[in-house]
Image (tube, helix red, strand yellow):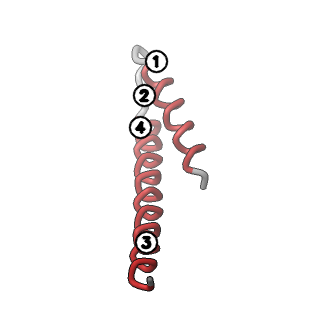
């Protein structure tokens, strides 16, 4: 999944919820938004861990 696409979707959805404050957000919408944020955070951690392990491998192998 493309992180940039996920980030754009989260920002757009958050903006929609902000502009529609009077209408409110359903619990399903909040659950989906929270899930997307958790997924994005998980992907970020996974990518950073892989990059860090790659760098450690380069330093140890060098």
| Image location of residue 12, percent across then percent down | 53, 30
Q: Which residue is mark 4?
A: 30
Label 1 sits on a secondary structure element that is loop
Q: CA distance from mark 3 to mark 2?
A: 43 Å
Give me the residue at 42% from left, 28% from top: 25
Marks 2,4: beta carbons within 8 A: yes
Q: CA distance from mark 1 to mark 4?
A: 13 Å
Instruction: Give the mark, 3 or 2, whose residue is nearer the N terminus.
Output: 2
- 10 Å crowding of disc 1: few (<14), some (14-19), many (20+): few
Q: Residue furthest top?
A: 22
Label 4 sits on a secondary structure element that is helix
10 or 45, which is in the foreground?
45
Please tell me the numbered disc located at residue 55.
Answer: 3
Q: Which residue is mark 1?
A: 20
Query: Can you tell which of label 3 and label 2 is closer to the viewer?
Result: 3
Query: Can you tell which of label 3 and label 4 is closer to the viewer?
Result: 3
Instruction: Give the mark, 1 or 4, whose residue is nearer the N terminus.
Output: 1
Work out which quarter of the rendered image holds the N terminus and state it.
Answer: bottom right
Total number of numbered discs in the rendering: 4
56 or 44, which is in the foreground?
56
Instruction: Give the mark, 1 or 3, whose residue is nearer the N terminus.
Output: 1
- 10 Å crowding of disc 3: few (<14), some (14-19), many (20+): few
Q: Which residue is mark 2?
A: 25
- 10 Å crowding of disc 4: few (<14), some (14-19), many (20+): few
């Amino acid at each position: 999944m493309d992180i940039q696409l996920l980030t754009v979707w989260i920002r757009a959805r958050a903006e929609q919820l902000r502009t529609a404050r009077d209408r409110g957000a359903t619990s399903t919408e909040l659950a989906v938004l929270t899930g997307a944020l958790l997924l994005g955070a998980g992907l970020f951690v996974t990518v950073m861990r892989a990059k860090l392990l790659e760098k450690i491998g380069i330093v140890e192998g060098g």
